[in-house]
Amino acid sequence: MANWDLDMIPVKGGSGNAYTARNDESRVFIKKNANPMLTSIYLEGITPRVLWTKRTIEGDMLSAQPWINGHTLTPEEMSDTQINQILSHLHKSKKLIDSYKKLGSTAVFPEHLLDTVYNSSTAIKNSIYLTGVTQEMRKNIPTLLEDEITVVHGDVNHNNWLVDDETERVYLVDWDTVFLSDPMVDMAYILSHYIRPVDWSRWLTYSGYQPQENVMNKVAWYGKLSYLRQISDYLAKGKMKQVNEEIQGLRNFCKLF
């Protein structure tokens, strides 16, 4: 049985919900109020093993996973083919889709995603350029068919990919942003932020997509959305340097279409 008298130390960058501790002489990573589907996601082999869960007296749920001796991926490492495999596995998992629906989750459609990010900050609304991008996107909202709906991670930034330095295995972590939607929410973020345009067709093909016109139209739309969502996130955190970098990235991305 796990020892519940743990001396939990906050993890830097964990937003106050992530800790490290010693448990039976082993170091563990503890998340407070993690996604309730974390165990199911672990069973798919996508994220590190869930060792135990426990509800505290205060009502919080703690989930423990092994401490991985590794590092988060750098932008330059995001072309690792394990990323294609993990996202393909995630997006094709019928078990996870069914489990999320049983929890009462419903699909989030592209128009709602666009409305949410546009209304998230007055800074976005007050930007002539960003408002123009969103207005153009409203004219070309992609369709999302029922059989296309899947579980998406929602924040596949390189900081949420962890590689075990001993085994070189890559894991996708931090599942607080997960929801049901179009798999291109995740795929287009990777393509727009990390993969050279000349390699897009190869990357999509390896991930199980035919880089035809309808797919590329979605890459364009969801790629723009990924920049807007990242801009919104950085604005909320007051990271203006990163905000400006994302705006420039969006400008460069829009030139490709």
Image (cartoon, rainbow, N blue to C red):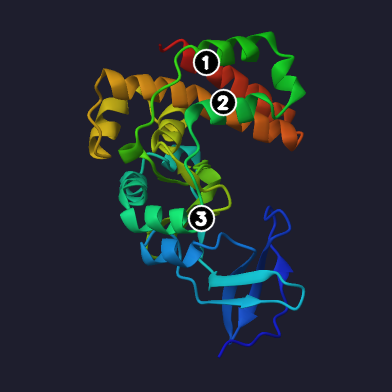
Determine contact: label 1, label 3, CB under 8 Å.
no
Looking at the rendered structure, the kind of residue marked 1 is: Arg
Nearer to us in this view, 25 or 42: 42
Nearer to us in this view, 15 or 119: 119
Left or right placement of residue 206 versus residue 4 in this view: left
Total numbered badges shown on the rendered structure:
3
**Of helix, strand and loop, which one carries label 1?**
helix
* Residue identified by numbered label 2: 114
Upstream in sequence: badge 1 or badge 3: 1
**Of helix, strand and loop, which one carries label 3?**
loop
How far across and down, in percent of the image, does residue 232 sit? 66, 30
* Residue identified by numbered label 1: 138
Q: Quadrant of the C terminus?
A: top left
Looking at the rendered structure, the kind of residue marked 2 is: Leu
How far across and down, in percent of the image, does residue 160 sit? 53, 49
* Residue 198 shows up from this direction: no
Upstream in sequence: badge 2 or badge 3: 2
Left or right placement of residue 147 versus residue 121 in this view: left
Numbered label attached to residue 84: none
Q: Quadrant of the N terminus?
A: bottom right
Residue 228, by quadrant, is top right
Residue drawn at x 70%, y 30% is 120
Residue drawn at x 48%, y 11% is 139
Determine contact: label 1, label 2, CB under 8 Å.
yes
Numbered label attached to residue 173: 3
**Of helix, strand and loop, which one carries label 2?**
helix
Residue 53, by quadrant, is bottom right
